[in-house]
Image (spheres, helix red, strand yellow):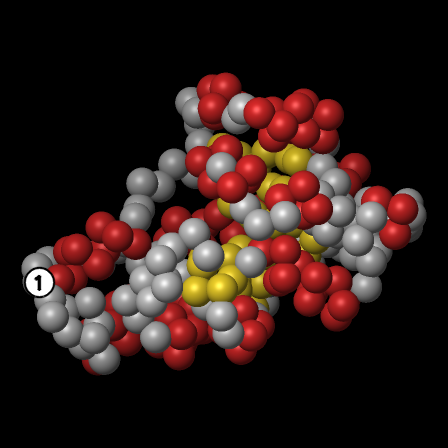
Amino acid sequence: MSEAAFTRSPVLKPIGVLGGTFDPIHYGHLRLAQQAAEQLTLQEVRFIPAGEPYHRAPGLASGTSGAHRTEMVRRAIGNNNLFRVDTRDLERGGATYTFDTLVGLRSELGNQVPIFVLLGADAFALLETWHRWRELFDLCHFGVAQRPGAEAWRERVGGELAEALRVRERADAQQLSATPAGNVVTIAMTPLEISATAIREQLSRGASPRYLLPDAVLEYIVANELYLEGGR
């Protein structure tokens, strides 16, 4: 899809896209989504559990089934009307590519609704390793979460991506509602050092990760015996 496919449009409320394995989902994911929704004036944030991320070896996408991960997301977002679960990547099967996810969203939403892919600064710095990464700018904006004191993240962006960031970064997120794709904006992010890997490790040794993730998610994990050493 070329840039010519998009024309400047009346202001439309954008949507956010937050993809990941969510294995398990935790407060870091939820806080990013909430702050992005407020700063970018999003009409909704779609949590899209990954199928088989192509960066990982086959069979190692997640230690937990898509059904379990989806249910944990549903329980985590609860009654937040800004959030919804989108299972398209699990239903499609095979390797998960953000490009394919966005093409599917464009087919559903049309070419004029602004779409923001939400991600951390570390993930954005690796964008050049993503499938058809240059074409992603034809399909979405990027909302890059920056923690206080982490202003130097741009210095880790190199190659073609550094030039793309130079010409595409915008300071005013509100201006982007008039265009559907093509820019990068920073999201001020509360510093929460929470890791799904660390949560799984704690659970595997019998420690409690309470207050790192919603109680509804922890209750589901316990009830289904997820992340136990040698367990499901």
The residue drawn where x is 67% and y is 41% is: 134
Where disc 1 sits, the SS reads: loop
In front here: 28 or 232? 232
In front here: 215 or 138? 138
Q: Give coordinates of residue 109: x percent, y percent.
A: 77, 66
Q: Is residue 50 above or below residue 34?
A: below
Give the residue pinned by disc 1. 206
Q: Give coordinates of residue 57: x percent, y percent.
A: 35, 58
Q: Give coordinates of residue 145: x percent, y percent.
A: 51, 38
Q: Give coordinates of residue 196: x percent, y percent.
A: 30, 54
Can you see residue 208? no
State which quadrant residue 229 falls in: bottom left
Q: Quadrant of the C terminus?
A: bottom left
In front here: 108 or 157? 157
Q: Is residue 110 above or below residue 114?
A: below
Can you see residue 53? yes
Relative to residue 94, is residue 62 drawn left or right?
Answer: left
Q: Is residue 93 above or below residue 187?
A: below
Relative to residue 216, is residue 208 drawn left or right?
Answer: left
The residue drawn where x is 47% and y is 24% is: 156
Q: Is residue 198 above or below residue 165?
A: below
Most extreme residue toward the front, as rendered?
A: 58
The residue drawn where x is 67% and y is 29% is: 164
State which quadrant residue 178 falls in: top right
Amino acid tagged 1: Gly
State which quadrant residue 111 falls in: bottom right
